Image (spheres, helix red, strand yellow):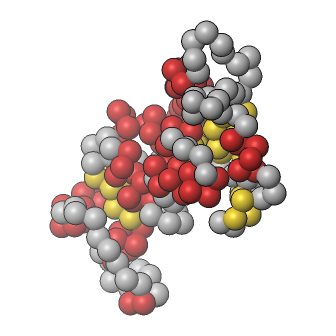
Amino acid sequence: MRFQRSLALVLPRMRNKFQSQASRYFSSLLESEQRSSFGIAFDIDGVILRGRDPIGGSPQAVRRLLKDSGNLNVPFLFLTNGGGVPESKRANELSEQLGVKILPSQVLQGHSPFKSLLKRYENQLIIAAGKGEPAVVMSEYGFKKVVSIDEYASLFENIDPLSEYKKLCFLPIDLEWVLSELLWKVFSIEFTIIL
């Protein structure tokens, strides 16, 4: 109950913050003498790309939104509910696939709203779960104490029946501290869940 109320309070603030960041970003990219009265948000999966391949004329369509100088004629960004990689990596991939320079700030992924939680949870222990490299993503956002779900599971013998088959690549973090922090928080019921 308490979690639902706090989530209901956080989500509208996150939405407003992203709207203002997006408008500032696009305003700076558009030439001041001629601003577009609209912008375009493209869904990546199934609209721009199918797998790793561009769909139909999507590269040409994106190029038409730019002026010859490379500046934006019409502001655009890419959305996906996927993630697991930093926005910078996704922007580089899109740039290669579409033949147009895409900036990390033009990519919004399922986990992008977590950036707005940095000030509040920067020094809190974060257990990152999800497809890809969620711990790397959260670390790139600036969170200081990030542990992947596999790293967390490896701290407890027999918690994961497949653990012996997984190859773990630990981020530079003091796992002894993490274990003591987790045990303290679990037994004192003070840990934070960010969804």
- Image height of 50 relative to 6, above or below: below
The percent position of residue 103, horizontal first and vertical second, equals 51, 41
The percent position of residue 132, horizontal first and vertical second, equals 50, 66
In the picture as drawn, the residue positioned furthest to the bottom comes out as: 164
Taking depth in this image into account, of 152 and 31 the one nearest to the observer is 31
Q: In this view, does 47 lie to the left or right of 134?
A: right
Residue located at (67% from left, 26% from top): 73
Q: Quadrant of the N terminus?
A: top right
Q: In this view, does 51 lie to the left or right of 103?
A: right
Q: Is residue 67 left or right of residue 143?
A: right
Residue located at (79% from left, 52% from top): 57
- Image height of 174 relative to 2, above or below: below
The percent position of residue 166, horizontal first and vertical second, equals 41, 84
Taking depth in this image into account, of 131 and 31 the one nearest to the observer is 31
Q: In this view, does 175 lie to the left or right of 84?
A: left
The percent position of residue 151, horizontal first and vertical second, equals 34, 71
- Image height of 20 relative to 51, above or below: above
In the picture as drawn, the residue positioned furthest to the right comes out as: 56
Residue 124 visible within the image: no
Taking depth in this image into account, of 164 and 101 the one nearest to the observer is 101
